Image (cartoon, coloured by chain):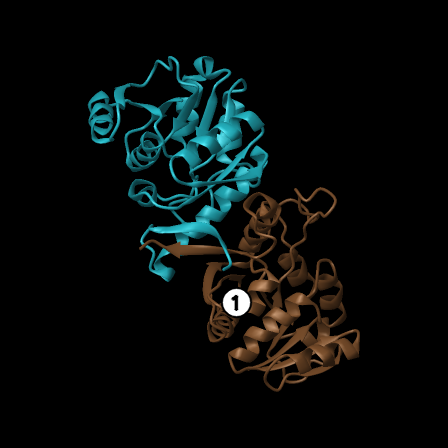
Chain colours: A cyan, B brown
Amino acid sequence: MEVLIVGSGHMARGIGTRLVAGGHQVRIAARNHDAARTLAAELDGDATGEPIGRLGAASVVVLALPYPATRMVAEQLAGELVGRVLVDIANPVNIGTFDDLVTPPGVSAAEQVAKAVPGAKVVKAFNTTFAANLTAGGPLDVFIAGDDETACDQVAALTADGGMRPILVGGLRHAYTLESFQLLHMKVQDQIGGNYTTSLELDRRQ
Amino acid sequence: MEVLIVGSGHMARGIGTRLVAGGHQVRIAARNHDAARTLAAELDGDATGEPIGRLGAASVVVLALPYPATRMVAEQLAGELVGRVLVDIANPVNIGTFDDLVTPPGVSAAEQVAKAVPGAKVVKAFNTTFAANLTAGGPLDVFIAGDDETACDQVAALTADGGMRPILVGGLRHAYTLESFQLLHMKVQDQIGGNYTTSLELDRRQ
């Protein structure tokens, strides 16, 4: 699958690492073309870097950006995004309180993105996985929510190809729960000695 | 600590098992006195069984009941509960859809219980732990939310004494997130082959 990752930060690197490991064609797009090219060169595989703008043959576009940049970029690319799978990974955490989200009660960042690009198939994924664990490889649960089942299945396949376990939780409205829980996951890092290296997992009992 | 567990089902057994293992004095109270006595006898330790009604010297009361029985019993015991720690474990899952909660949007079962017993120190805990994993022993993360820090610390201590890892996620309003996430945890059991034996964990990366 050809996947365009928008962003050149830690999450872009982590998701890019997994997609390349899964044998997929990865394009990194960033406002800073050099940063995109540098990251692409550092990923194994034949990843390429480019400026943000053209979506080309990418069937899946991952917004590996913080909130609210996700919304703004989605709006900018709205016309081109129609018919494509759009993966939102954002956590709209209120960094002032670190105890709230900045989105309105009950409304997820993912649903806001979906509203901004009505023709795109928006899927929430990778918001519960810290970048370090994505980049490091190894088992990882990826919670996926979306209204388009085929789109969810595509993201699940990309996830499984990258050595992770996809967990499909249902419609996009459940993105609110994923975002809310991840706030809790983030805020307890000090308490559990995690330093953003824990993973949210549904382990199987032995 | 003297803990009164209201209920004689699987969750009462699981929580009772852990509390007894932690060396605490456990009283099982149930509408069916025989069921309470039978469960108490089956728990190791000096657990006792009794009918619902008297709270006595219990500093912590666990409502090991399904929603909405939690609310009704809390209302019945309201006068006696003032000043005590009241643990709500309920998951208000809509069993018709298995994709929604039956509580109003944004309002947790735990907050409803707190409203019903204004003088009690309500703590949400054990709603993300399946009964089988409690009863089986072994490592388990217990997510805890509550507005009274001392009450949360008491529940955390009980949890740790029973061989589990307490994770304090903040105020009682976060109970909504715990309840919402547990719905997702329940609904994906078929998908991940769990049969209600998975645990929600924040694993540490190696």
| Extreme residue toward the front, this view | A206
Query: Seen in the image, is B108 located left or right of residue B22?
Result: right
Task: Write down the residue under mark 1.
Answer: B148
Q: Quadrant of the N terminus of chain B?
A: bottom right
Q: Quadrant of the C terminus of chain B?
A: bottom left
* Residue B110, x across and y down, in percent: 63, 59
Look at 48% across and 58% down and name the residue there. Answer: B170
Circle 1 chain: B
Dot 1 alpha-carbon crowd within 10 angstroms: few under 14, some 14 to 19, many 20 or more: some
Residue A77 against residue A6 in the figure, above or below: above
Q: Return the residue nearer the eye: A127 or A151.
A: A151
* Residue A3, x across and y down, in percent: 38, 23
Look at 63% across and 50% down and name the residue there. Answer: B107
| Extreme residue toward the bottom, this view | B46
- Secondary structure at numbered mark 1: loop
Quarter of the image where one finds residue A46: top left
* Residue B2, x across and y down, in percent: 59, 82
Please tell me how many numbered marks the rendered image carries: 1
Residue A35 against residue B193 in the figure, above or below: above
Answer whether residue B125 is visible to the viewer in this image.
no
Answer whether residue A63 is visible to the viewer in this image.
yes
